[in-house]
Image (cartoon, helix red, strand yellow):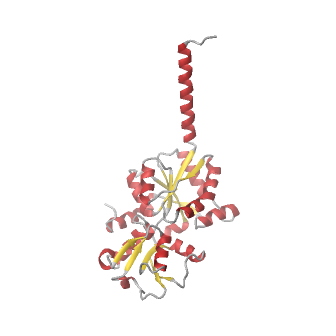
């Protein structure tokens, strides 16, 4: 039996529309996640893999981790809605918050991130004993947009009366905390500033030898890392994600492994107001207008 042309046309249109809806539904079942590249990509992937599987089980969606080349890519990605959730440092969160017209939502942070610190390191046999000894020395920060590897160390240096760009012999950027540690250990620079958590981890895993490097200054505490989501995500999804992080229990062996990789024992709720001090420090340091 022949089907009238207009009927075939209608069926084609319906089929096309159904395929479009199916594609859209499929796209919305994937949560796209990224993180600032404060460590090498392999390590970031290793740390996130168990957490990603756990989140999938809690939110009923596929979770995909996408590594990026630099800190700015996470800010642009969230603002352009190409990324749904990002592991940010305090400064990159502030940048993303402003870039998204203050719609980005920090949902959780590690308990340690309420009182995070940076360390200044040098070679064990170095003559550097204090911040004042850095005058006319070579120095490396981490990435330019790093909170614990650049912004806050620079802020504390300025408070101590030391402008790195004027009083140091040379200032460089390693790109990541582990790279900073290895450059100092290898004698490529006299000193550097890095995330205390990465420093302790590298010492514990024997990727850094205390016979080669030592800490000569530890900063006062400040707010740092958090998990941030796009503000226009479904509120129900945001709640599921928040609840999933808060439900992680160190007494549960599988949860304990996830928490260990995240270098914490628990996650706690976060809020944008926590990072006002970071914003003010960035403005004072000339890193944010």
Q: Where does residue 218 sit, x and y in percent of width and height? A: 46, 78
Q: Where does residue 114 sit, x and y in percent of width and height? A: 50, 67
Splitting the image into 4 quarters, where does residue 257 fall?
Answer: bottom right
Q: Number of labelled discs? A: 0
Q: Quadrant of the N terminus?
A: top right
Residue under the image location 56 percent in, 37 percent down: 25
Residue under the image location 55 percent in, 75 percent down: 200
Residue 252 is at least partly visible in this image: no
Of residues 148 and 124, the one nearer the viewer is 124
* 157 vs 99: above or below: below
Q: Residue furthest right?
A: 253
Residue 47 is at least partly visible in this image: yes
Q: Where does residue 164 sit, x and y in percent of width and height? A: 33, 75
Of residues 123 and 222, the one nearer the viewer is 123
Q: Quadrant of the C terminus?
A: bottom left
Of residues 227 and 3, the one nearer the viewer is 3
* 28 vs 162: above or below: above
* 259 vs 14: above or below: below
Q: Where does residue 8 sit, x and y in percent of width and height? A: 56, 17
Splitting the image into 4 quarters, where does residue 43 fall?
Answer: bottom right
């Amino acid at each position: 039996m022949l089907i009238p042309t207009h009927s075939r046309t209608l069926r084609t249109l319906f089929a096309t529309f159904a395929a479009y809806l199916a594609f859209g539904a499929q796209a919305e079942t994937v949560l796209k996640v990224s993180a600032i590249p404060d460590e090498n990509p392999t390590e970031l992937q290793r740390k996130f893999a168990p957490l990603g599987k756990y989140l999938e089980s809690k939110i009923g969606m596929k979770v995909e981790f996408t590594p990026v080349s630099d800190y700015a890519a996470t800010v642009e990605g969230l603002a352009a809605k190409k990324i749904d959730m990002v592991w940010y440092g305090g400064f990159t969160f502030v940048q993303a918050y402003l870039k998204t017209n203050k719609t980005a939502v920090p949902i959780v942070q590690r308990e340690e991130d309420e009182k995070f610190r940076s360390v200044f390191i040098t070679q064990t046999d170095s003559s550097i004993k204090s911040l004042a000894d850095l005058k006319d020395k070579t120095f490396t920060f981490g990435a330019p947009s790093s909170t614990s590897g650049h912004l806050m160390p620079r802020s504390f240096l300025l408070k101590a009366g030391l402008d790195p760009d004027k009083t140091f012999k040379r200032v460089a950027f390693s790109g990541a905390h582990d790279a900073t540690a290895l450059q100092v250990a290898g004698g490529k620079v006299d000193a550097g500033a890095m995330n205390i958590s990465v420093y302790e981890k590298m010492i514990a895993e024997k990727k850094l030898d205390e016979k080669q490097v030592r800490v000569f200054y530890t900063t006062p505490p400040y707010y740092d890392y958090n998990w941030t989501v796009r503000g226009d995500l479904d509120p129900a999804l945001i709640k599921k994600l928040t609840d999933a992080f808060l439900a992680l229990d160190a007494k549960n062996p599988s949860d304990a492994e996830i928490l260990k990789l995240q270098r914490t024992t628990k996650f706690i709720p976060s809020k944008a107001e926590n990072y006002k001090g970071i914003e003010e420090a960035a403005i004072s340091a000339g890193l944010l207008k």
